[in-house]
Image (cartoon, rainbow, N blue to C red):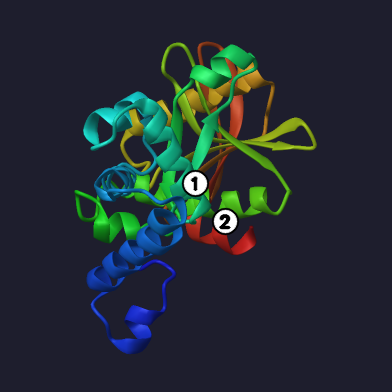
Amino acid sequence: MEGGYPEPLLRGANRVDYLRDLVRATLLKDIVRRYKIRSSAGLEDVAHYFFSNVAKEFSFRTVASVARVSSPTTAEKYTRMLCESFLIFTLNRLTFKARERTAANKKAYAIDPALAVCLGTRPGQDLDRLAENVIAIALWRRQMAGEIDLFFWKSKELHEVDFVIKERGKISQLIQVCVDLSDPHTRTREFRALVKASEELRCNELICLTRGQNAVEDFTWNGTTVQIRVISMEDWLQQI
């Protein structure tokens, strides 16, 4: 995934070096100097953690434990600064209780997938998570424009749906991202989560974004049958 930064292509620059310099300059100019942070080591650790773990749940306690920061409070502060500098953005878990909303884990995404590909611990990472990052960026832009509210959903049984879309206060779509649906076990796992979320959230607009496939499928789980639209990610991104 090449990302959206044009300079490496236009100038023939090394993409990894360019992105590394860009992030360092952003951290230094937009955050360290602005907020008078004495040492940038902890901030750099937090940024590296998120670039290495796109589309994964996190808690500030976890971030603090792997980064050179003093507490979860500092990890939360640094995360907010990274969001304000447009290096990452976060997604809240959909909950209906204020106490759960405060305590629930979040998910984080790179503002450009190239940051995860080039600057994360695992070059290339998991294709499903990188694809989810691409879809998240497109939906986040709609949220920033005030068109939707965006969440992820997870049940007590750990079934997960990547994106829950609310429009005008009502849940309108549930979206799952899976690059390859050819494995029956993978297909069942992804579709089953959509069934569970559909029942709990009372939403029937179910979408699974994948690679190179368009279809409408009926899927039955535990006596409940739903209709799922399987859409090519490329086609969906062109239409959004």
Please name the residue shown 28% across and 86% down the image. 12
Task: Assign a secondary structure to mark 2.
Answer: helix
Please name the residue shown 48% across and 21% down the image. 104
Report which residue position mark 1 lands on.
209
Q: Amino acid at mark 2?
A: Trp
Q: How far from the left and from the top, in percent, is residue 63?
A: 31, 32
Task: Determine whether, in the image, residue 156 is placed left or right of residue 227.
Answer: left
Please name the residue shown 77% across and 31% down the image. 169
Residue 95 vs 149, above or below: the answer is: above
Q: How far from the left and from the top, in percent, is residue 34?
A: 46, 56
Residue 62 vs 40, above or below: the answer is: above
C-beta proximity under 8 Å, tags 1 and 2: yes
Residue that lies at the very extreme toward the bottom in this rendered image:
11
Report which residue position mark 2 lands on.
236
Task: Assign a secondary structure to mark 1.
Answer: strand
- Answer whether residue 86 is visible to the viewer in this image: yes
* Neighbour tally class for label 2: few under 14, some 14-19, many 20 plus, Cα within 10 Å: few
Please name the residue shown 44% across and 49% down the image. 82
Residue 160 vs 49, above or below: the answer is: above
Mark earlier in primary sequence (1, 2):
1
* Neighbour tally class for label 1: few under 14, some 14-19, many 20 plus, Cα within 10 Å: many
Q: Amino acid at mark 1?
A: Leu
Q: Which label is found at residue 240? A: none
- Answer whether residue 187 is visible to the viewer in this image: no
Between residues 84 and 131, which one lies in front from this camera angle? 84
